Image (cartoon, rainbow, N blue to C red):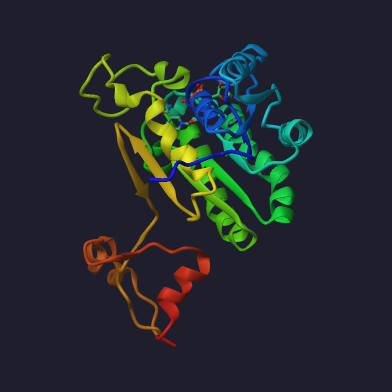
Amino acid sequence: MTKVSFEGQVVAITGAGGGLGRAYALEIAARGGAVVVNDLGGAVTGGGASTGYADAVVDEIRASGGRAVASYDSVATVAGGEQIITAALDHFGRIDAVIANAGNMRYAPFEELTLDDLNALLAVHIGGSWNVAKAAWGHMKRQAYGRLVFTTSSGGMFGTQKLSAYGAAKGGVMGLMHSLADEGQPHGIICNAVMPNAMSRMTSNIQAGELGDNPWGAKVPKTFDPAFTVGLSAYLASRDCVTAHGIYTALGGRIGRAFVGVAEGMHGSIDVPPTVEDVAANWELIRDASRGYAIPGSVSDEWRSVVEGRY
Ligand code: NAI
């Protein structure tokens, strides 16, 4: 097995002052990559700021002989995104990969969440992914090489109670990845997304058992350590990953592709629109994925799969 190396590469990791981002930064630096360790250093909900989070990780990397620089910028602003990439260029001369990992969280029943809560999450998850990807995009296009790893969540993919604002934001990140994957691939920019599941500052605020049925109570298995997601995210950020447009879940030691698919469904007449009764009568057929499904690689892919041969 060839060793996956980041020698000669520069990777910017947002929200890398703790949890998953810290684990990614340490791994990539240990594999020879120079790392921009970005972290605003605020609270889980997003307020406040400090330099301590990013500095501590940079110190850790340097103490082991690695190369890293701290960034305390907020990903939620255009200027913040640009400064993160500028830090990579100023200190290390290039940018090869970005892991857009910074995140905040509001965990409450729908009736308690406000539009301000939603906007705070959209700004960091969607805005943050957008800002940092956009700042790197032109450089990656010019060098015909780039890796963008976005961070979505089962909260956005599958949904669960008390995560409506967070789920909306993470769903948006997925949409961003889908489009950028299609747009970036001809330019050598490979985009993918991860769905981590790890104990971190963010998730430790959630009571054991609240996110669905947690059979372990307070004793969470070690497979929920951020270390169990590192291999996946680092691989997606590496030269070795040449496959775009994927969403990959890391959960309890299992890594697998998660995808958006379309069931074969009901193919009605192309002359007469289906009636409400037609839909009602075929409801099981429309929902049934056991007869096969497609995983469209793009909008036109879905179009082709339905339209080709029928007109
Ligand atoms: P964490 O709270 O330890 O890490 C998130 C980091 O992002 C924090 O250090 C925080 O200071 C930083 N951050 C927040 N707002 C920022 C901003 N505006 N600019 C720059 N940095 C900012 O949590 P964790 O679990 O390591 O989360 C990492 C990512 O993984 C997040 O995007 C989270 O939503 C996502 N995720 C985590 C899951 C888990 O099970 N831990 C599940 C699914 C997704």
Residue occupying image coordinates x 31% and y 26%: 223
Residue 97 drawn at (x, y percent): 61, 42
Residue occupying image coordinates x 77% and y 33%: 79
Left or right, 283 with reference to 23 = left
Q: Nearer the viewer, residue 284 or 246?
A: 246
Q: Nearer the viewer, residue 49 or 105?
A: 49
Quadrant, the C terminus:
bottom left
Up-down relation of residue 181 to residue 54 (above or below): below
Residue 125 drawn at (x, y percent): 57, 35
Left or right, 286 with reference to 271 = left
Residue occupying image coordinates x 67% and y 39%: 132
Left or right, 307 with reference to 175 = left
| Residue 168 shows in the view | no
Up-down relation of residue 221 to residue 96 (above or below): above
Name the quadrant containing residue 294. bottom left
| Residue 236 shows in the view | yes
Name the quadrant containing residue 208. top left
Up-down relation of residue 153 to residue 199 (above or below): below
Residue 279 drawn at (x, y percent): 30, 68
Q: Which of 90 and 294 is in front in this view?
A: 90
Name the quadrant containing residue 272. bottom left
Residue 216 drawn at (x, y percent): 22, 20
